């Protein structure tokens, strides 16, 4: 394929241990301090691009095929013909090169595809070559103790961007809606929020999907509520929940359904599976979810998740 070099071996050997990770930027494997983008890249100027956040477990790319399908579908949704420049197989090779260059065993890949370098105007088709960045590093979204204890979240006052304006199914570089909602959480002394849509229905967290448990069944908002169709969400629905013997139903949820849930949990590539145990703007008068600690079903799902991602059979498909 044209324009994006994938032979990065020579550059890799120049890595020093203090300037890591080595980062793939538009055909080059560069040490962290030199990994930079052109200021005329529309990814930077306009948030014009798409991305993926992907887990690496035991050196394997977790659900690689699904992440590639979503990336290429999102590129298509913003009228970016990515395949013309980089095939999905080449995109996977870039990720494997980054894993190898950084000796990554367990970690996280951030794959960014920008519209590319163009003019100062909005015109996206004046950017002839998409930009491709791949960072393989560590991530810790929430402190480890919260996985045992469960976390507090707030209900964001700011609604999720409506599907008609910018479909949240597109994992675009435009994350300000989520960032401003996350700031609401941070201002309230916690790390995540529940975002509602403009009709008042529950959508998702700022960087993860939401599930509730009620009377032994699991419910999660449907895609049409305005959510990212998370790959961890799909893993829970199609694999983990059946393994622990619980049904999942996609259903529009009101915030009252969430308040009255027996359990709540969030899912995401970075977040994995984590319980929400309190909802409110401060610790003292937060609503307690269920028993106030991680629920039985959430615990079973989280344990199953950890079992699979630490097994000798990490699913890449
Ligand atoms: N919703 C949003 C808004 C996200 O950014 C993410 C990913 N960080 C998710 C849900 C979870 O998606 P996935 O399981 O594919 O990581």
Image: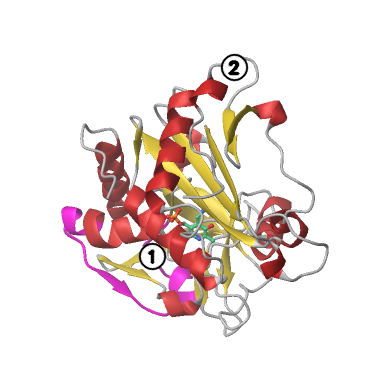
Labels 2 and 1: the sequence-earlier one: 2
Residue linked to disc 2: 14
Magenta segment boundaries in residue numbering = 241-266
Q: Quadrant of residue 313?
A: top left
Q: Is mark 2 within 8 Å of ligand 1?
A: no
Asked if the residues shown at circle 2 and circle 1 are in contact, with their CB atoms under 8 angstroms apart, the answer is no
| Rendered position, 296 above or below 252 | above
Is 256 in the magenta? yes
Q: Quadrant of residue 266?
A: bottom left
Residue 294: % across, % down: 38, 48
Q: Foreground residue, 159 or 23?
A: 23
Q: Quadrant of residue 73?
A: bottom left
Counting labels gives 2
Asked whether, in this view, residue 14 is left or right of residue 94, the answer is right
Q: Identify the disc placed on residue 212.
A: 1
- Which residue sits at x=80%, y=62%? 119
């Amino acid at each position: 394929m044209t324009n994006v070099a994938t032979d990065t071996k020579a550059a890799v050997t120049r890595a020093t241990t203090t300037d890591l990770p080595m980062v793939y930027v538009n055909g080059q494997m560069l040490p962290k301090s030199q990994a930079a983008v052109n200021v005329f890249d529309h990814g930077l100027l306009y948030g014009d691009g798409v991305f993926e956040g992907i887990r690496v477990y035991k050196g394997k790319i977790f659900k690689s095929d699904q992440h590639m399908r979503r990336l290429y579908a999102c590129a298509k949704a913003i009228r970016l013909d990515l395949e013309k420049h980089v095939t999905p197989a080449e995109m996977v090779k870039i990720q494997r090169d980054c894993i190898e260059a950084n000796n990554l065993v367990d970690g996280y890949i951030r794959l960014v595809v920008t519209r590319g370098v163009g003019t100062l105007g909005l015109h996206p088709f004046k950017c002839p070559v998409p930009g491709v960045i791949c960072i393989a590093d560590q991530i810790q979204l929430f402190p480890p103790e919260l996985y045992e204890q469960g976390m507090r979240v707030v209900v964001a006052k700011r609604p999720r961007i409506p599907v008609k304006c910018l479909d949240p199914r597109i994992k675009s570089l435009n994350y300000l809606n989520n960032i401003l909602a996350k700031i609401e959480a941070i201002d309230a002394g916690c790390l995540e929020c529940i975002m509602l849509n403009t009709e008042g229905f529950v959508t998702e967290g700022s960087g993860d999907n939401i599930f509730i448990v009620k009377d032994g069944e699991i419910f999660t908002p449907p895609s049409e509520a305005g959510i990212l169709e998370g790959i961890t969400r799909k893993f829970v629905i199609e694999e983990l929940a059946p393994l622990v013997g619980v049904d999942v139903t996609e259903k529009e949820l009101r915030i009252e359904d969430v308040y009255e849930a027996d359990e709540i949990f969030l899912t995401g590539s970075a977040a994995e599976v984590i319980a929400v145990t309190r909802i409110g703007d401060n610790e003292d008068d937060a609503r307690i979810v269920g028993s106030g600690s991680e629920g039985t079903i959430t615990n079973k799902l989280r344990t199953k998740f950890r079992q699979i991602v630490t097994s000798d059979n990490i699913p890449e498909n």
